Amino acid sequence: MARVAFYAPMKSPDSPKPSGDREMARNLMQAIGAQGDRVDLISDLRIYDKVGDAVAQHALRQAAEVEAQRLISDMPEDIDLWVTYHNYYKAPDLLGPVVAQARGIPYVQLESTRASSRLTGPWARFAQAAHTACDAAQVIFYHTANDLITLKRERFGDQALIELSPFLPIADLPPASTCDGPMLTVGMMRHGDKLSSYRILAEALSHLSGDWHLNIVGDGPARPDVENLMTPFEGHITFLGQLDREVLQRVYGEASIFVWPGVNEAYGMVYLEAQAAGVPVAAQDRPGVRDVLAPADYPAAEAGAKGFARHIKSLLDDPKRRRTLGQAARTRVAARHLMPKATEVFWSAVRPMLEVTA
């Protein structure tokens, strides 16, 4: 069995702040260790510049130099592999390439992106560092077809690019929904893209008529804004707040349709959770989102809230179609998006590398 150093420069899996990025990092650690290999979170150093601040970037680079030297000296001798999750221009991996080279161990990346457009401007040095880190990786596992475009165009040497689909940290599907309860939305309430999705959702709901109901799961700093958006639909909306995993699973199990536009979602774990429970999805056809959705007639973002509303109504009006789409989605999740598949894909590519370097 191998011992793996795992690192996430943008946000540590141990961060107390919930996010999709944190959850995916945790899921990846679990998947990599599922065959009995040991996975160590090797550093909590956060390398992240949200606004393009040259002074902050300089300070982070200095901190990374100190941390890299510490790891070269103190990292356990039996570490066989370095794995970095989510290297990109705002959060470049400034540790992995340096430490892996010094220790003579393979270096791979998960969900990395290349952004040539950022090689000039306020993130220029960080963007170059992210490119350099990509070049150092023997394997880059990508999650979406959108990420593959630039990774393939700027592939370094004979670097392997391998699809590792987003996945749920479970081996078996949960019980299937009856698809006849309220509609469901699950989304963090943050300003920016999340609030933009809630705005589209609210406008779409304004085009619905009849006796419909929507449960909304989520919380966050933008909750007052979300509640204000939903004020016109009093009696049709129930806010359930932030739920623990067990309760949320029961809510999925009662939902008729999962409704979320998906503005700038990298992919959206909530789509996988809903589909695993056999809940059909109403979403907009967007990059990233389409990588985790079972095939269906999703409206383009350009169709706006009215197009989204027509999509929702078509599902509300057809219970048989809801169940058919939900079962198809459930089958697809079982084949592509559960943890055993991710573990298989990862180690099928990486185990031979370790055998060569052993």
Image (spheres, grey):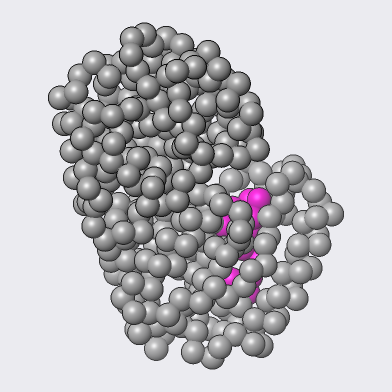
Q: Is residue 186 left or right of residue 9?
A: left
The answer to whether residue 354 is magenta is: no
Q: Residue furthest front?
A: 235
Which residue occupies 40% across, 37% down? 289
Q: Position of residue 309 (x, y in %)?
A: 38, 15
Q: Residue furthest bottom?
A: 77
Image quarter of residue 297: top left
Whether residue 329 is visible here, answered yes or no, is: no
Vertical side of 197 occupied by 167: above or below: below
Q: Is residue 81 left or right of residue 314?
A: right
Placement of the C terminus among the 4 image quadrants: bottom left
Q: Position of residue 265 (x, y in %)?
A: 49, 38
Which residue occupies 58% across, 46% down? 115
Vertical side of 130 occupied by 78: above or below: below
Image quarter of residue 287: top left
Whether residue 334 is visible here, answered yes or no, is: yes
159 and 145: which is toward the camera = 145
Q: Which residues are magenta?
A: 87-98
Q: Is residue 114 left or right of residue 341?
A: right
The answer to whether residue 94 is magenta is: yes
128 and 71: which is toward the camera = 71
134 and 219: which is toward the camera = 219
Which residue occupies 60% across, 21% down? 228
Which residue occupies 33% across, 27% down? 182
Q: Position of residue 137 (x, y in %)?
A: 50, 66
176 and 96: which is toward the camera = 176
Q: Position of residue 79 (x, y in %)?
A: 50, 84
Q: Is residue 125 left or right of residue 235?
A: right
Count of labels shown?
0
Q: What is the chief secondary structure element of the magenta stretch? A: loop
Placement of the N terminus among the 4 image quadrants: bottom left
